[in-house]
Image: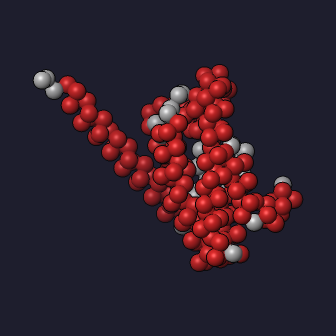
Amino acid sequence: MKGFTDALLALGPLGVFLFAIVDGAGVPTPGGLDALLIFLCAKEPTAAYLMATLTLAGSLIGCFILFYVARRGGEAYLAKYTSSGRGARFKTWFQRYGLLTVFIPALVPIPMPLKAFVICAGAMGISPWAYLRVLLAARIPRYFALAYLGSQLGTQSWPWLKAHALHMLAFSVILFVSLYLLAKYVDYKRARQLTVPE
């Protein structure tokens, strides 16, 4: 794995693009993509936003690869990954909270399970456009913020993120609850409008 990482570092912007595809497609790389993006932005601050753009593009490609693999596999593929344990719990969460379960782990740069929720989105027939909007809303602020952090703090970026992990977790919980309540309110208003007699 170290040789692979060294090769990606040597490739610079192309390396982070390729790594983002692999990461988005569901290959386990916990924290790896974020660390690579920060390192490259610290090394070349003037190219930080180029790195962020390439990371975003690669991540979208990888996430859509996993999405469409799950979509083609359907219920059988879903059952394989969510039949028991944590996978079953993640499936239940997706059924209850929908694409919010994709948005939060895609946004917050702390280890959170995204793969299972992407599989659920694909296998359960979620609209690709809705999925794309959620990914863009989460990944754009994440990668551009990390690029800014790397370009400004350099090698201190990763320690800073670790020191603020609890703050990000609290933020993700508050954001999740807020968005969930907002979605419920919108559904309630829509349902009331449909039931109002003409």
Residue at x-position 75% and y-position 60% = 15
Nearest to the observer: residue 11 or residue 172: 11
Residue 59 percent coordinates (x, y): 63, 50
Residue at x-position 54% and y-position 66% = 145
Residue 182 percent coordinates (x, y): 32, 45
Residue at x-position 71% and y-position 75% = 43
Nearest to the observer: residue 58 or residue 32: 58
Q: Quadrant of the C terminus?
A: top left
Hey, which quadrant is residue 122 in on the image? top right
Hey, which quadrant is residue 84 in on the image? top right
Residue found at the very far right of the displayed protein: 3
Q: Is residue 25 visible?
A: yes
Hey, which quadrant is residue 72 in on the image? top right
Q: Is residue 115 above or below residue 14?
A: above
Q: Quadrant of the N terminus?
A: bottom right
Q: In this view, does 53 lie to the left or right of 21?
A: left
Nearest to the observer: residue 81 or residue 166: 81
Q: Is residue 126 above or below residue 52?
A: above
Q: In this view, does 8 lie above or below 82?
A: below
Residue 158 percent coordinates (x, y): 64, 69
Q: Can residue 2 be seen in this view?
A: no
Residue at x-position 55% and y-position 64% = 144
Nearest to the observer: residue 44 or residue 159: 44
Q: In this view, does 43 lie to the left or right of 75?
A: right
